[in-house]
Image: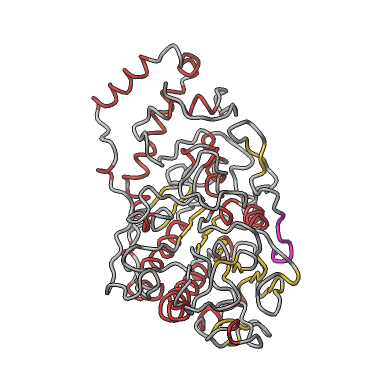
Amino acid sequence: MLRIPGHAKRACDGISRRDVMRVGTLSLFGGMTWPRLICASDSASENGTPTGPAKSVILFNLLGGPSQMDMFDPKPLAPVEVRGEFQAISTSVPGLAICEHLPNVARLMHRASLIRTVTHGYNAHNPLPIMTGYTGGDFAQLRVMPTDPPDIGAVCQYLGRGPRDLPGSVCLPCYPGWGESSMYPGIRRPGPYGGYLGRQYDPLFAVCQPTFERKPEIPYYDTVTPYGEPQLPGCDALPQMTADRLDRRRSLLDQVEEQFAAVQRSGAIDRMQAYQQRAFSMLCTSKTRDAFDLSQESEALRDKYGRNLFGSSLLVARRLVERGVPFISVHAENFLPHGSFTYDMHENNFAMLRDNNLPVLDRAWPALVEDLEERGLFDSTLIVVMGEMGRSPKVNSKAGRDHWPQCGFSLLAGGGVREGVVYGESDEHAAYPKNGPVSPADIVATIYERLGIDPHMTVPDLTDRPIAIAHGGEPIRAIMT
């Protein structure tokens, strides 16, 4: 029997969401993580119209765990095995110092709020906490589960945010884990998914084919930069939408007519076919594809962002913001066996940061801030830069730093965030919050608040329990305008 586990939330036509999801299993895109089959987007809702200062969010996930003391929380008075190799430099915020290898970021720190006390206990390389606020997951989980909570983009789609002819959420340059699939077949790191709201609320996942200038000399811990651009999956990768295929689908529906009688009486099947066609159109027509066409941008601007895969992804993110897409996530990715871009630096930490990761961030983040400002979009776009954890205070024997979720950072700018604010203080080794601890749920709640979405709003999980979308997090009022 064709069934997707769900719950009995009533949809806009009075039938249950479970029934609509069952019909969705018969869709032209069965088995795929997209299209955006949203009934909720067709119904007028007070949550469907943005009411907060942020109309869109760009989340840059520094997957792997960026080192707080080597980037945004230097400790120059700490012992050398803690403070590391880098020097601190002044920024445009009086009294605030950051890493010497982030000079362009330093000159724009007056446009941002910096949180230095992100703390939790989820020790895993999944963006689940920073995209959902949930920190109770299994550390060893490497695949998406239907019991996972929905991310911010899924909730935006659930509430009908964004233009009807564009995806409500986009994930760039690929789904987290794709670059590791040569070593871990089937890996899909949980985080950017619809979770128990259903796969119809997954984002549109871009695809990529990065190139590399050389082979890595140190397995996993070399400074090899991926180049290229995120791309949409080709229309020819989708099941062909032929009359014969439609007839077969209709025949299959006829075979289960009795089971779906209530759904058929409501007209949901006809509407579902309309959603399928709309989703196909979103993928194959020019409006979505134009957003990915970086040839429309000047050479100078592309150089400003950086021609690497992540600079290009942030430029695509800006183009999606221009078109009204409410949530875009960009994820650092570890492309094995070619090399590493992620911040999981158990070895060679300082060379990887100095020669690769920090120059990429120092070019792309200021370019995004200034580009949005020039286009009048900065105040309505919330930019969030963070990773799933920080790094251990003490440098290990391989010049690396190990996992450390007890203290990390988050950099927020635009979209209703105060400027030039430093929130929270870590101890002398950047090991634990000294004051102002912040959980991932608090950051997620802040994002929802800036989008005009109540972070205490609940959605039902697979057992119909009401679960708060920010998982108990509270907005950080001190960084909000």
Which residue extends farthest top?
Answer: 258
Q: Quadrant of the C terminus?
A: bottom right
* Residue displayed at 49% across by 76% down: 400
Q: Quadrant of the N terminus?
A: top left
* Residue displayed at 63% across by 86% down: 79
Q: Position of residue 300 (x, y in %)?
A: 35, 76
Which contiguous range is marked in magenta?
A: 474-480
> In this orientation, which residue lies closer to the viewer: 327 or 80?
80
Q: Position of residue 465 (x, y in %)?
A: 66, 34
The image shows a total of numbered marks equal to 0
Q: Is residue 345 above or below residue 250?
A: below
> In this orientation, which residue lies closer to the viewer: 215 or 24?
215
Q: Is residue 384 left or right of residue 253?
A: right
Q: Position of residue 388 (x, y in %)?
A: 55, 61
* Residue displayed at 58% across by 42% down: 48
> In this orientation, which residue lies closer to the viewer: 343 or 301?
343
Indicate the colouring scheme. secondary structure
Q: Position of residue 86 (x, y in %)?
A: 53, 86
Q: Image quarter for residue 25? A: top left
Q: Is residue 99 above or below residue 306?
A: below
Q: Is residue 176 left or right of residue 231?
A: right
Which residue extends farthest front?
Answer: 397
Q: Is residue 211 left or right of residue 416?
A: left
Please check the rendered image and state whether residue 477 is part of the magenta-colored stretch, yes or no.
yes
Q: Is residue 272 left or right of residue 100?
A: left
Q: Image quarter for residue 403? A: bottom right
